Image (spheres, helix red, strand yellow):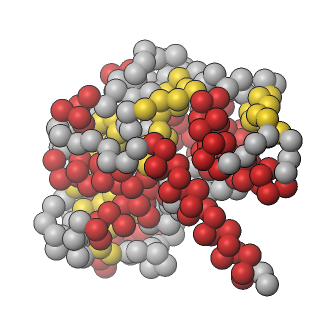
Amino acid sequence: MKKDAKIYVAGGETLIGSAILRQLEVQGYQNVIGKPPKEPNLTQSEKVKAFFEESRPEYVFLAAGKSGGIQANQKYPAELMLDNLLVECHVIDSAYRYGVKKLLYLASSCSYPKHCPQPMQVESLMTGSLEPTNEAYAVAKIAGIKLCQAYCHQYGANFITGIPANAFGPGDDFSLEESHVIPALIRKMHDAKIESAESVEIWGTGTARREFILADDLADACIFIADKYDDPMPINIGGGLDLSIKELAELIKEAIGYRGQLHFDISKPDGMPLKALDSGKLRSMGWQPQTSFLAAVEATYNWFLVREEKKAIAHV
């Protein structure tokens, strides 16, 4: 991509979308359009078409669509599925109809079968049953992958897919109901520390393992892929480190300075037993994450503390 190329990040208010916007600025891209609050409602077809017709982006990063952890997926499966399906259909179709040169769609590691070989390879997609706790969301993300491939096959569109590991970082959602595991644990342990609570409850057995990637490292990988990758076969984007939920909780406990106990509620679901990505293709192309996991957690917690302080001042 040339530095003056017209670029649109769909989902600029999401964790990943906002990180892509930051990275584009850092790397000197000068013509980014549709930034919040100017982004259209992507669930409304006519508004998406009008935006593309007027703006005519050359490159699109599709990072939009609602997401959440196990609790949100269990409580709002219809909402999560419908939102993602609508966004994918409207953005991908408009990208084709209005001449986008290249589109990078971000799927999810939830798209892989629950019991596929580890680390997960793209060849395993659609070879087995999905994890029940996030099946509706996963089906929607798979539909996005297949829609990109369909436009490639039928129209020759250069629409590619990246499958990221669990992203986290500054700007994350720290609500207990809808957040993913890292921001949820940060919120729980921070509140427990402030309240001098004796213990923190964590869903599941603690044995499930997840691979994580800082959102800004993921954003850097997205720009790298958009510049260098042209295959309709999806490409994995992993941070290279997978941890059990228990190991993760202990690390976050140490980073926050919480001194209480961790209680694992085994009556609650674990989700997939292991989600680690085979990112060998991306590594062979020359990309590596730049941030250590501990540094990424500390940066995320520091951002959270600043936000909490601003909220407290605003309520005075």
Asked which quadrant contains residue 7, the reply is: bottom left
Residue 111 visible in the current orientation: no
**Quick check: 25 above or below 196?**
below
Residue 163 left/right relative to 76: left
**Quick check: 149 above or below 47?**
above
Residue 246 left/right relative to 227: right
Name the spot of residue 117 as percent of width and height, x first.
43, 15
Name the spot of residue 181 as percent of width and height, x first.
62, 42
Q: Residue at x 77, y 81 (%)?
A: 315
Q: Residue at x 85, y 55 (%)?
A: 195
Name the spot of residue 37 as percent of width and height, x first.
49, 78
Task: Choose between 210 and 246: the one closer to the eye.
Answer: 246
Asked which quadrant contains residue 2, the reply is: bottom left
Q: Residue at x 35, y 39 (%)?
A: 237
Task: Choose between 39 and 150: the one closer to the eye.
Answer: 39
Residue 260 left/right relative to 270: right
Residue 286 left/right relative to 130: left
Q: Residue at x 56, y 63 (%)?
A: 303
Residue 137 visible in the current orientation: yes
* Quadrant of the rendering where the N terminus is positioned: bottom left
* Quadrant of the rendering where the C terminus is positioned: bottom right
Disc count in the image? 0
Name the spot of residue 137 as percent of width and height, x first.
57, 40
